[in-house]
Image (tube, grey):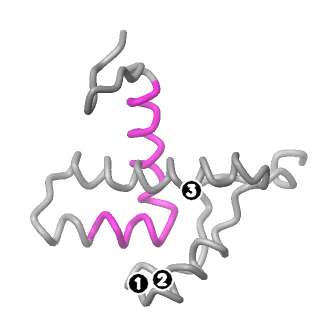
Amino acid sequence: MLLCISGTLVPSFLRQSSHEFALHSIRSCPWAKALYDSLRDRGKGHHAAVRAVSFKWIRILFACWKQRVPYDPEPYLHTLRIRGSAYAQAHSCKAIPTCEQNSE
């Protein structure tokens, strides 16, 4: 099934998978939790805040795919620190295992 979002057809399975990934990353990734909590404090609903986290993850994972590098939270956290973001207080994420962890 396809859903129309902002004039673009998006498979509902992909949308749901992205939403669920973001929801679980909030529990294990400090910057994602900080972003979620910040949005909730500003009055956003639960699903709106999870969608915002999902959008961040999509941008990060797309950049990893485009540059052909595995996910590493440090470059993203470094950029957040340079920009003075409150989310930069987070240290590391455990949401995505690295290749080395998968081979064990």
What label sits on residue 88 in the rendered view?
A: 2
Query: Which quarter of the figure has residue 78?
Result: bottom right
Q: Give the residue number, with chain letter if any, for mark 1.
A: 85
What is the number of the mark on residue 60? Answer: 3
Residue 57 lies left or right of residue 34; in this view the side is: right
Asked if the residue under mark 3 is in contact with the one under mark 2, i.e. CB atoms within 8 Å, the reply is no
Q: Which mark is residue 31?
A: none
At horizontal 56% and vertical 56% (from top left) the residue drawn is 60
Of all residues, the one furthest to the top in this rendering is 1
Q: CA distance from mark 2 to mark 1?
A: 6 Å
Residue 30 on the magenta span: yes
Residue type pointed to by label 1: Ser
The residue that appears at 13% across and 70% down in the rendered structure is 42
Task: Report the front residue among 80 and 32.
Answer: 80
Q: Residue at x 45, y 49 (%)?
A: 24
Where residue 27 appears, as percent x and y from the top left, is: 44, 59
- Range of residues picked out in magenta: 14-37
Inter-mark Cα distance, 1 to 3: 16 Å
User: In which image quadrant can residue 56 be found?
Assistant: bottom left
* Residue 59 point in image, percent of width and height: 51, 52
